[in-house]
Every structure is written in C-alpha cells, then in structure tokens.
Image: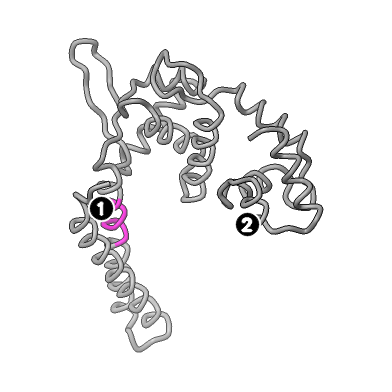
C-alpha cells in the first residue's frame, strides 16, 4: 500500500467514512482497509506516515520468499502473506506456526527444508523445529525424508486441509465421548450431568458431520 493510499485512508476516517466506502474509493477489498487500520492504531489513532514506516520495518525483518533464491517479494505478495499470517493467527495458530505454514503455502512448490525455512524467516532452527512439529501433529503439513542428503523436507499439499479437519474432528469426537460419559456418570437428570450430556451430544454431532463433509468434499476441484 502506498503513502498516498494511506493518506486517503486517514482522510476518509477523518470524514467519518466507513471502511467499505474507503475501500471502494481506493479499489481495495474492505478487509484490506480494516486490517490496515486495525494494525496501525485503529480508526481514532491512525497515522498514515507512522503506518507506512511500520510496514517498512516489517518488510525489512523479512518474510519467506516464494522459493529459495527467488527475487524479493513485491508489495502485493507481501500484503497477501501478511494478511494470511494474521488470518492463521486469528484461527488460533501461534505466530511462529502461522508464519511457517503460510511460508510453505506461498513457496513455489510447497516444499522446503528446515534450513530453508530458518533462512527465509530469519529465525533459529529451534523455532522452526518447534513449529513444524506442531504443524505436522495437526496435519497441516507433512514430513518427507530425503535419503540422499539426509534431511527432512516439509510439505504442504492439496490434502493438508483434509487431514487437519479429520484430526481436529476426531479430537472433538473424543472430547464429546468424555463429556457424554461424565454426564451419564453424574446422572443426566442432574443439572451438571444434563449439561455435560447435552454438550457431548452436540460436539458428537458436529464432529461426525465434519468428518462426513471432509470425505465428501476431499476431491473438490479449485
């Protein structure tokens, strides 16, 4: 986003315009405007020059290139990556895990080694190790072994969301079974037992629906 666009955002906010109206005037998505304002002081304290400098600092810290040795990211790619990382954080991923996941998603072929991730994100190998361990456990990425070079390669592919959904749904189903069993133990005719039983039944139904839906739509074309 340019200095001029940020100045126009500030002017629009001062005039009391909505994010949607400002977005239309700039030919930008409303989500881009709300994210820009939200991360730079909010509508009452948005300063265009300060916002521009903050974005420049984030860019200098570096984010993962689309592939090792690729040219530096242009503004649009950087903006997409920042927005995607914020989205992943909003969905519950810790920041480092989000950066690694989105870095893999935006890499050329969705395959990077731990060393490439460490260099691209400018973080320690230990941070990468912790992040990929968590993401692998959640089914968001998978690990492949390169026997010739004796290194692990981390991969994100078309089945990543399927596997993640299945793992999450099975975890929810396990929680549902525990809640239902606890409710029956305490007695479903008691306030606590009834509450646990109803909650368990709800979680059971939701998780089963999610598992069925994941199977139904696994091969959905783009």
Q: Which mark is residue 20?
A: 2
- Residue 179 in percent (x, y) is at 33, 70
To which quarter of the image does residue 137 belong?
A: top left
Mark 1 — residue?
166
Q: Earlier in the sequence, mark 1 or mark 2?
A: 2
**Which region shows up in magenta?**
165-172
Looking at the picture, the colour scheme in use is one colour
Q: Which residue is found at the position 40% from the left and 16% from the top?
A: 68
**Residue sitting at 28 percent across and 21 percent down?**
152
Label 1 neighbour load within 10 Å: few <14, some 14-19, many 20+: many
Q: Secondary structure at mark 1?
A: helix
**Residue under the image location 27 percent in, 34 percent down:** 142
The residue located at (30%, 75%) in the rendering is: 201
User: Foreground: 49 or 179?
Assistant: 49
Tell me the SS state at disc 2.
helix
| Above or below, comparing residue 205 to residue 45 in the picture | below
User: Residue farthest to the top?
Assistant: 149
> Where does residue 36 sit, x and y in percent of width and height?
64, 44
């Amino acid at each position: 986003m340019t200095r001029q666009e940020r100045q126009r955002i500030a002017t629009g906010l001062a005039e009391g315009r909505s994010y949607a109206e400002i977005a239309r005037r700039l030919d930008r998505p409303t989500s881009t405007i709300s994210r820009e304002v939200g991360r730079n002081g909010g509508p009452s304290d948005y300063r265009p020059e300060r916002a521009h400098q903050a974005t420049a600092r984030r860019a200098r810290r570096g984010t993962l290139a689309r592939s090792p040795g690729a040219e530096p990211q242009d503004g649009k790619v950087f903006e997409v990556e920042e927005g995607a990382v914020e989205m992943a954080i909003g969905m519950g991923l810790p920041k480092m895990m989000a950066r690694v996941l989105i870095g893999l998603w935006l890499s050329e072929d969705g395959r990077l080694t731990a060393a490439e991730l460490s260099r691209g994100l400018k973080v320690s190998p230990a941070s990468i190790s912790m992040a990929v361990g968590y993401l692998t456990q959640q089914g968001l990425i998978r690990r492949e072994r390169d026997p010739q070079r004796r290194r692990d390669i981390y991969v994100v592919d078309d089945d990543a969301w399927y596997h993640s959904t299945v793992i999450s749904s099975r975890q929810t189903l396990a929680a549902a079974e525990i809640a239902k069993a606890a409710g029956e133990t305490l007695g479903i005719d008691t306030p606590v037992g009834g509450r646990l039983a109803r909650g368990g039944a709800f979680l059971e139904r939701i998780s089963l629906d999610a598992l069925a839906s994941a199977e139904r739509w696994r091969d959905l074309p783009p």
